[in-house]
Amino acid sequence: MLAVGIGNIAFAVLMVAYVRGASSTPGLPMWMWARMAFGATQLLAWARPEAGLPLLSIVESAGWVAGLTLEAAAYAIFFGYPQLRRYLVPMASLGVLLACAAFLNGLPRTQLIVYVSLTMGLGAFTTGAILMHPRLPGATALQRLIGANDMGCGAILAVWALIEILGSGITPAMESVAYVAGYLLLIVNGFGFILMSKQRDDARMQRLATTDDLTGLLNRRAFFARAEAARLLSLRLDQPITLLMLDIDHFKQLNDRFGHATGDEALVKFAATCNDALREHDILGRLGGEEFALALPGTDLDGALHVAERLRQGVVDTRLLTCGNHYTMTVSIGLVLVDPDEDLATALARADHALYEAKRNGRNRIEVGTAVRRRA
């Protein structure tokens, strides 16, 4: 108990420095306070027999309830269910009141420990079931592993407590298993929450490195990497791949006339319109400003023309709320079929030249780039 208590407080102290020095994952500060509550309670449980103060049993029980409540709140925040926190305060208050009532009515401390263990077991089993739920958004193998530990250890604690309550008799082996389950529950949850937070931070940094912040599309570097990989795969499979350059018409005038908020709305709605019209494996990226690029693996010239026309018409039908729906947005598109002997940069240059022709010929249109000339 002393070792686990010191460990939990050490966890909390380390997290104080981390939370204050960086942008922390949602729920991590709450989890830090949960570790602090658990650690203080465990130290109290270790020191209480020496103190000889019966009232400390109430404080100890309240500490367990507080730790469980804070941990549940941390998980609720982490997984995006902050509304669940409103139920935790009345439940925690009820738990503390029951602990006080049990002590004042002469319930032996050992029985109080049994009821607290039952509460911890049921709470851990419920948390584990949530982590193991197949519909949990963004679930990872790490979350499943923590969930399995929570369900297993929670079930052991709950069964042990129920056997004790029913008076069926607890063997020393069963008691040892229950204590080990309790330690595993606390330690795995402690390390597990840190690892889940790091995993989420890593995923966020990966998104920032590859995604355009405004539109949510691939940024320039990520588009080139994905499109090049698609080009090489199409070459190996002897399948066509087409490239499109897209540019929102008169974007500077749109910004000057209605303001940058309308310009941002135009970019966001343009990206959403394109995403709605594309397949999952099509590759769309924002190269900069109002210029976008699109790679269509497995699509020949006729298929790409059909996609481009669908995009062009979808953009025309888009309305911008920030300018009162008084503006019709259009897009010019340059399109090429990638030749097996040319690299991605050369194909994009041809598509960009076709885009220039679409602009020169009146905008709101599609131009197909000239084919690659082969040497005789």
Image (cartoon, rainbow, N blue to C red):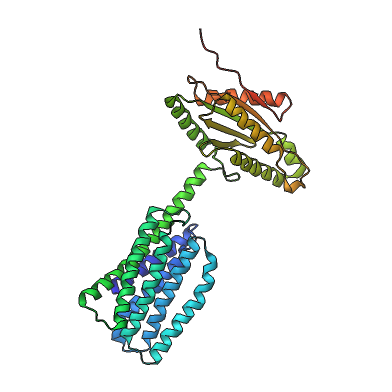
Q: Residue at x 41, y 66 (%)?
A: 127
Number of numbered markers: 0
Q: Residue furthest bottom?
A: 105
Q: Residue furthest top?
A: 376
* Pick the front one: 356 or 284: 284
x then y, percent, for residue 51: 31, 87
Is residue 322 depicted above or below 364 in this figure? below
Q: Residue furthest left?
A: 172
Is residue 325 depicted above or below 242 in this figure? below
x then y, percent, for residue 171: 21, 78
* Pick the front one: 34 or 105: 105
x then y, percent, for residue 78: 48, 61
Q: Residue at x 74, y 26 (%)?
A: 362
Q: Residue at x 47, y 46 (%)?
A: 206
Q: Quadrant of residue 355?
A: top right
* Pick the front one: 342 or 150: 150
x then y, percent, for residue 196: 41, 57
Question: Can residue 375 be spotted in the picture?
Answer: yes
Is residue 114 depicted above or below 186 in this figure? below
Quadrant location, the N terminus: bottom left
Question: Can residue 182 be spotted in the picture?
Answer: no
